[in-house]
Amino acid sequence: MNFAVTSGPPTPEELQRELQAFMKQHFAGGAPPFFNRAAPATPPSQPATTDEKEFQFSHKPKDVKAHLDRFVIKQEEAKKVLSVALCDHYHHVRLASMGQDQPNYAKQNIILVGPTGVGKTYLVRSMAELIGVPFVKADATKFSETGYVGGDVEDLVRDLVRQAGGDVRRAQYGIIYLDEIDKISTASHITGRDVSGRGVQTNLLKLMEETEVPARAPNDIAGQIQAMMEMSQQGRKQPSTINTRHILFIVSGAFDGLEKLVSKRLRESMIGFAARGPAQDRDEEVIRQAQTRDFIDYGFEPEFIGRLPVRVFCHSLNTDDLYQILAHSEGSIVRQYEQSFGAYGLKAAFKEDGMRRLAEMAADEQTGARGLMTVCERVFREFKFELPSTLVSQFEVSRELVEQPAAALKKLLEQNLGEGEPIARQGIAAFTEQFHKEHNLKVAF
């Protein structure tokens, strides 16, 4: 099909005319067979749609926190707040699915504040996996106001449907996670239309409350055709819109500079009371006292920040925290490297002093848990390249190896050369004997 070039997407009438022309051109007898199939009858013993199924949720806050403890080290207060908010939200969803909706319930959307690499994304993803709901993550910076170049925030809701395998009902209970939300704060010096800041905040407002999002984007022609095919094949029409009432929205960001706004407010509030200001307080202690006013001063619309009532503050990770992640987290990068070397028949034994040294070096990177990957990749890069082609079967990751990987690798290869010589001689002897039997010729190396 060829649509005429216009200033915008085709209208429904134009789309219908083009589809009719396409059918007449390619199918002389009308629509192809699958468009004419009769809808299969629904057996009486089975529910007609998935809408009749109740949403199942029976977790308690301590259950959720215990699950998060397996994957995320420290952040105790953050895990408690998240666990309570999550249980409140999904117990309300469960009651609503049973016809016991609470009309005055205010949805507990969440804002996560904390430096990079402290586990914000990991926390949200782990929660979604526990509940078994669709989960979509995106960076807020890729979106713009509708009608401008950039992504449309409504695409997030449609992504939930894709994650749910096309099940709109299940998608309406999902979690949408927007990272780098601090990057769409409105700069004070902007006087014109801010389509990637204030415009995105405005578009997110209706999603975070309750609205109907079209299941197919208006300009998604392929999606419209697919919807017609699904209707003919499955015998029933999928819902044309997605309601966002029970979708949980979680946003996060580092919010660099927010602590200065909080400190300024605290100093102003103490004038005339002879109280000592928080000049000696650390930035993380100050930022935990952030209020709605501070987020507004940072560049957020009052209506936007007001729809994020649950505020969670994550602290940065020190050396001991990073060691605990390596040694005890179920998602530790140590497991990843053990599996990587294990694929070549190599056993990497991580010793305590080796992991502590990795944690110390990662702390110097000042990127949280992401620093562990940076350090490990630098330390083990040559080991991954050299060892799979040798007879080495195991090695220990000690403090000495982490501090001087090149020297440790050289020593390991020299040991392998000495141990491998007798094995090589046995192999050569076996080859010459077999060659002599098969060809009656003697060869010497």
Image (cartoon, helix red, strand yellow):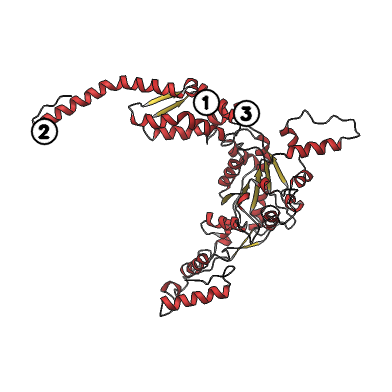
Residue 232, given in percent of the width and then of the height, sits at 47, 70
Q: In the image, what residue occupies the spot 85% across and 37% down? A: 268
* Number of residues whose C-alpha sits closer than 10 Å to that of mark 1, classed few (under 14), some (14–19) or many (20 or more): many
Q: Residue furthest right?
A: 272
Residue located beneath label 3 in the image = 318
- Spatial CA span between label 1 and label 2: 54 Å
- Spatial CA span between label 3 and label 2: 66 Å
Q: In the image, what residue occupies the spot 44% across and 31% down? A: 381
Under mark 1, the amino acid is Met
Q: In the image, what residue occupies the spot 56% across and 37% down? A: 71
Q: Is residue 257 above or below residue 99?
A: above
Is residue 29 rendered to the left or right of residue 116? left
Q: In the image, what residue occupies the spot 76% across and 47% down? A: 296
Secondary structure category for the residue under label 1: helix
Q: Is residue 445 above or below residue 259?
A: above
Q: Is residue 312 above or below residue 36?
A: above
Secondary structure category for the residue under label 2: helix
Instruction: Work out whether mark 1 precedes mark 3 in sequence or the reverse, and give the earlier one.
Output: 3
Is residue 76 rendered to the left or right of residue 266? left
Under mark 3, the amino acid is Asn
Nearest the camera: 71 or 345? Answer: 345
Residue 178, given in percent of the width and then of the height, sits at 63, 48
Residue located beneath label 2 in the image = 438
Q: Residue furthest left?
A: 440
Q: Is residue 429 visible?
A: yes
Residue 374, given in percent of the width and then of the height, sits at 52, 33
Residue located beneath label 1 in the image = 355
- Spatial CA span between label 1 and label 3: 14 Å
